[in-house]
Amino acid sequence: MASFKCLIFAALFVALSFSRMDVGLAARHLQQLPPLPSVPNLPKPSLPPMPSVPTLPQPTFPTNPSLPKPTLPPLPSLPSVPKVALPPLPSIPSIPNIPTTIPSIPFLSPPPGN
């Protein structure tokens, strides 16, 4: 089944490759055409003028100084949030020291020559 999917993918890739060649050839043929004759100036369409926006009547409110102005009720207060105490963080264990000097390796003396 996997080889069938690979075959379909390969066929699709080849088909796309050939279609790109046709597009390239068509573009080349379009570039080789003689210049087209100029188009005469066509009249531009004109739009009718926009109608004016009518003014809406403004409402008039009666004003009576003896009447008190309405007031908004006060906003409710937010409840207090309890404080959260976190436990202390555990201490980080200390890292042991790594020796920086390399001990010398004793070399054996070469065997005596005859």
Image (tube, rainbow, N blue to C red):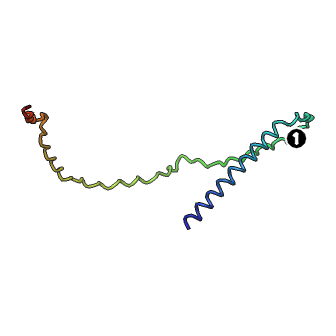
Q: Is residue 86 left or right of residue 16?
A: left
Residue 95 vertical placement versus 12 (above, below): above
- Tell me which residue sits at (75%, 46%) in the image: 23
Q: Residue farthest to the top?
A: 113
Q: Is residue 31 visible?
A: yes
Q: Position of residue 80 (x, y in %)?
A: 29, 54
User: Dot 1 corresponds to which residue?
Assistant: 45
- Image height of 109 relative to 47, above or below: above
Name the image quarter holding the N terminus. Answer: bottom right
Q: Nearer the viewer, residue 11 or 49?
A: 11
- Residue 62 lies, in percent from the top left, at 61, 49
**Position of 81 compared to 35: left or right?**
left
- 51 and 17: which one is in front? 17
Q: Secondary structure at mark 1?
A: loop
Q: Residue furthest front?
A: 114
Residue projecting furthest to the bottom? 1
Residue depicted at 89% across the width and 35% down the height: 36
Which residue appears at 68% of the width and 52% of the height? 16
Residue 93: x percent and y percent? 14, 47
Amino acid under disc 1: Pro
The residue sitting at 62% across, 49% down in the picture is: 61
Q: Quadrant of the C terminus?
A: top left
Is residue 106 visible in the rendered image? The answer is no
Q: Is residue 110 above or below residue 16?
A: above
Left or right: 35 in relation to 23: right
Q: Nearer the viewer, residue 112 or 75?
A: 112
User: Quick one: 106 or 44, which is closer to the camera?
Assistant: 106
